[in-house]
Amino acid sequence: MNKNSNFSRINNCIDALKKLARTGWMQRGIPPSITETVASHSFESATIAGVISNILINHGYNINMEKTISMSLFHDFSECIIGDITLFAKENLLGDEKKKALELQIFSDIFKGYNKILEIYEEYSIGKTLEAKIVKLSDRLSTCIQAQRFYDNGYENVKDIIVNTKREVDEILKEFDSEIRKDILNLCQ
């Protein structure tokens, strides 16, 4: 299959992600008309990843900001095929490694022939580089910020998401000094 014929599949996936509501919000009673889609979440995550990269660069870190933003834009792309798998399903049915393997397999099939994109996604999936960790952090921050928006608008059923994502954010931020943690946490204010 050549790249151009494969792009129609990529385009169909983009369309699906623009329409696919994030499952956790739907399970907590957020109306479909206002819920966040996977594509809007990816855009917000990429924006946050760019800002975090800039903060870390200002603190002397050597970061490839363009890679971080690209990685963040693609991080949930396989959900166009498998859907937005809930935390419960991941923890109790699939397991983290099986979910990652499935996502990588689907992503590799969608982006067959786009080697640089595949390389960036594989780096994210492994999760060891600073860029991949920034993407994970931006993903969790985006979720926490969106949960807070819903909570502030009267959707109190999202409180557990706020609590759990804040815990995950705190865990990720442990590897940075207090000044950097403060700068990043100020994004949530």
Image (tube, helix red, strand yellow):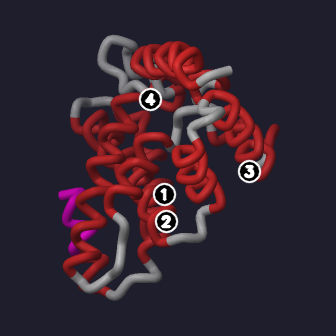
- Sequence-first disc among 1 and 4: 4
Mark 1 Cα shell of 10 Å, populated few (<14), some (14-19), many (≥20): many
Residue with the mark numbered 3:
96
Q: Between residues 82 and 185, which one lies in front from this camera angle?
A: 82
Give the residue drawn at x 43%, y 70%.
170
Tell me whether circle 2 and circle 3 mark residues in contact (CB < 8 Å): no
- Amino acid of disc 2: Lys
Residue with the mark numbered 1:
136
| Main SS of residues in magenta | helix
Q: Quadrant of the N terminus?
A: top right
Mark 4 Cα shell of 10 Å, populated few (<14), some (14-19), many (≥20): many
Label 2 and label 3: CA atoms lie apart by: 16 Å
Label 3: which secondary element: helix
Label 2: which secondary element: helix
Label 1 and label 4: CA atoms lie apart by: 15 Å
- Sequence-first disc among 4 and 2: 4
Residue with the mark numbered 2:
133
Rendering coords of residue 133 (x, y %): 49, 65
Q: Which residues are magenta?
A: 183-189
Tag in front: 2 or 3: 2
- Amino acid of disc 1: Lys
Tell me whether circle 3 and circle 4 mark residues in contact (CB < 8 Å): no
Q: Quadrant of residue 50?
A: bottom left
Label 4 and label 2: CA atoms lie apart by: 20 Å
Give the residue drawn at x 20%, y 66%.
186
Label 4: which secondary element: helix
Tell me whether circle 2 and circle 1 mark residues in contact (CB < 8 Å): yes
Mark 2 Cα shell of 10 Å, populated few (<14), some (14-19), many (≥20): some
- Amino acid of disc 4: Val
Rendering coords of residue 143 (x, y %): 40, 45
Rendering coords of residue 100 (x, y %): 71, 47
- Sequence-first disc among 3 and 4: 4
